[in-house]
Amino acid sequence: MQSSTGEDSIDYFNLQYTTMTRVSPSYKVYHNMWMHNSRWYALLPSDNSSTVDLEEGLSPNIAVLRLPVEDLRVFGENLRVTHIKGNSLLVDFPFQAYHDHLGHWLEIMVPIFSVLYEDDWLNHTQGDSGSIDTVLFPNLSKYYLNSFFKSILAVALAPGTATRSHPEIMDYADLDKVMQMGWIFMDNLVLVSDRYTHPQRKTGFPNPEHGDLWRYDGCDRWISPTFVSGFTNPVHGLEFRDATYIGEDLQAPPAWEAGTPPALPMTITFLQHGTAGEAAIENPEEHGTAGEATIEKPEEVMSMLHEVADEFGMTATTQKLTPQAPFSLHLKTVMSMLHEVADEFGMTATTQKLTPQAPFSLHLDTVMSMLHELADEFGMTATTQKLTPQEPFSSHWSRSYPLHPPHTLLLAPEHDCIHLTSHEPNHSHMQVISMPHELADEFGMTATTQKLTPQAPFSSHLDTVMSMLHELADEFGMTATTQKLTPQAPFSSHLDTVSSTGILVARHSSLLASAVFLPPGAAVMELLPYKWEWHKISMLYYNVTQSIGDIHHWAWRPMTDEYCKYADKQGPRYRDWFPSECHAKECLQVFDKAGLIVDTDALRTLLRSKIPGMLAGKSVEELSEPWPIAV
């Protein structure tokens, strides 16, 4: 930030009143804007301050106050002022309570990229600066921006920072520190349009169509009925995606022209939230804003995907990531491909990379890899069971000797120690310190992994969906994978997941923000919660992918609550409410947090009707489906 105080920085003799320029519905520019004590001021002539053409709705959470001033020079000279020179971009995060929501971050970054890419905004700024010099976060801390936020921000700002390396970032703490010394004066303040800012400060929900969310969380929120978050030009979307890949040192995906088969990864990815489960439902505050409930019986979905994949000559595998999702874990996706090539030529493919600082789960995966190879060599089965001392004794017993077939290796983590148990007579515990998958293969064993929480039932439902997806993938000869991520995972993990995906299947959640980076010609199969809707917010990710023009996007939504697993006993009382009546936070969260049971037959039918056309290269328009409306 270039800033200074006093007359050497601001020419008070030639100081102008605040004005606003809007030549496009996409953005507006304020000139000579002032800020003090967390309030934003437009200094206007005292004789007509109320009639000056100025939008008082600055951004979702900020209004401009009209301040009549008789003499600007006298006013300014009697203040202690910090001058933020050049062009400042205001980024006002619309939902402060959900500060880590990737989807809301994406919906404000995408329009910013489009506006900065066009360069027209520069023609309506004062001074000789040719870029964005400062980015203001009035309600976010830059120290809490996760990897996804930072990476997307860098890409979104790139077109507007061509003449400088990086703009200065000022968050609310920086602004507050400066305001303690006096006022802030900005030459130009650029604001990109969003769906939450009314030009004349209209807030709240005074009319029935606006709902009554304000009664529960004080959210004085206005929603534009016409603004659609997305790129204003499909070219912007293509450039945004390519720039993101290049920024992560990855090769941009090949372009696709409708009518020709796309060069897609033949992979169906079932994306799940890393904190999914009953714990996330019962304690959403502990799991952040993205701790939404997820899919019930996922093995059924995976089974269906295997069937579809087999139909198209693809191979089915499952990849699981920890909630922390270190980048090295995503390399397992590459290793899966290498294993297939190695098997084809009678070779063995292994990769082991560990440091003492690596998460314990990484070490555990390494041991499991060795056990799988060892089990394969001897015709045994390698399984992983996770138990806690609090689980019922029957759970421990059912996973021990009497109920296990002979020749089973049981990898049982106990705190920081791993033991290998063989359920053959006269075999004792022995500590394992090397590579499980390699040993399993060496001895002809079969490798499976079972992961249980102390509550267990929720994860068993996930297996149902996964099973269906695996069957669908097998049917079309595709690869069905399961990925678990959290919003806090490194951005490279999100990008690796979608870059190797042809069809992304996921429940509506903030993780779908990464769908914008799918390869051209890929598809999203979004699973929507029962009755959950609020001012078409379910279409958030759909609007962004469609604005690019080369990503298919379909959705399935249950129409009865038999597919809804309520998180508590109060949930069923909302089952008969119409979506138009369910505007309050309490009602919305009932369906947002409820478990979603997938109608695998309906999902299988929909995917089977779309995949052949997608692989043949049919256009997004040809394969489009009406968005399922909540009823």
Image (cartoon, helix red, strand yellow):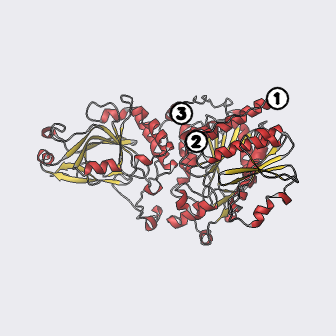
Mark positioned earlier in the residue sequence (1 or 2): 1
x%, y% of residue 467? 76, 50
Q: CA distance from mark 1 to mark 3?
A: 34 Å
User: As shown in the figure, which amino acid type bears the numbered disc 1?
Assistant: Gly
Q: Quadrant of the C terminus?
A: bottom right
According to the picture, the residue beneath numbered tag 1 turns out to be 346
Q: Is residue 200 left or right of residue 388?
A: left
According to the picture, the residue beneath numbered tag 2 turns out to be 494
Q: Residue at x 81, y 38 (%)?
A: 441
Q: Residue at x 20, y 49 (%)?
A: 44
Residue 546 appears in the picture as rendered: no
x%, y% of residue 549? 57, 37
User: As shown in the figure, which amino acid type bears the numbered disc 2?
Assistant: His
x%, y% of residue 24? 37, 40
- Element on which disc 1 rests: loop
| Position of 443 relative to 559 (above/below) | above
